[in-house]
Image (cartoon, helix red, strand yellow):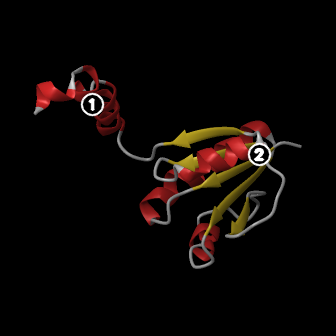
Amino acid sequence: MAHFILFPLMAHGHFIPFVALARLLEQRTGHTITIVNTPLNIPTLQSMLPPQSTIRLASLPFNVLLICIISDFFFGWTVEIAHMHGIFHLVFVTGAAHSSAIGFTNWIRLPHTKTDSEYLT
């Protein structure tokens, strides 16, 4: 059975969308879903899940077989972990779509990448 690992940032504002995503994956796929966080945050995450939920919670560090990592935007290190293990990786952005779009647009249109360094000095 497929196993999805979700890494929300250790901030309560990031828990709500990650728990919502986990519940959608649970309902629509039937695969195993695990949310990973620090031991201090596990009780908070547990309180956000319905009693009948099959979503697992794991404290760092953990040892499970993976097929996909879904990480918070701020956890760039999970890309390398997924690559090392040959598994699929997704980034879940919990911020507003508008601010994310502005950030992305600014990043791909960086003017200094298209000019000579002498021009800027």
With respect to residue 46, does 92 lie above or below?
above
**Residue at numbered disc 2:** 85
21 relative position to 114: left or right: right
10 relative position to 118: left or right: right
Type of the residue with mark 2: His
- Residue at 32%, 32% (x, y): give it: 107
- Mark 1 packing: few (<14 Cα in 10 Å), some, or many (20+)? few
Quarter of the figure with residue 42 = bottom right
Q: Secondary structure at mark 2?
A: helix
Q: Quadrant of the N terminus?
A: top right
48 relative position to 10: left or right: right
Q: Quadrant of the C terminus?
A: top left
With respect to residue 85, does 113 lie above or below?
above
Type of the residue with mark 1: Asn
37 relative position to 95: left or right: right
- Front residue of 44/38: it is 38
With respect to residue 85, does 62 lie above or below?
below
Res. 106 mark:
1
Q: Secondary structure at mark 1?
A: helix
- Farthest residue toward the right? 1
- Residue at 44%, 47% (x, y): give it: 94
- Front residue of 86/11: it is 86
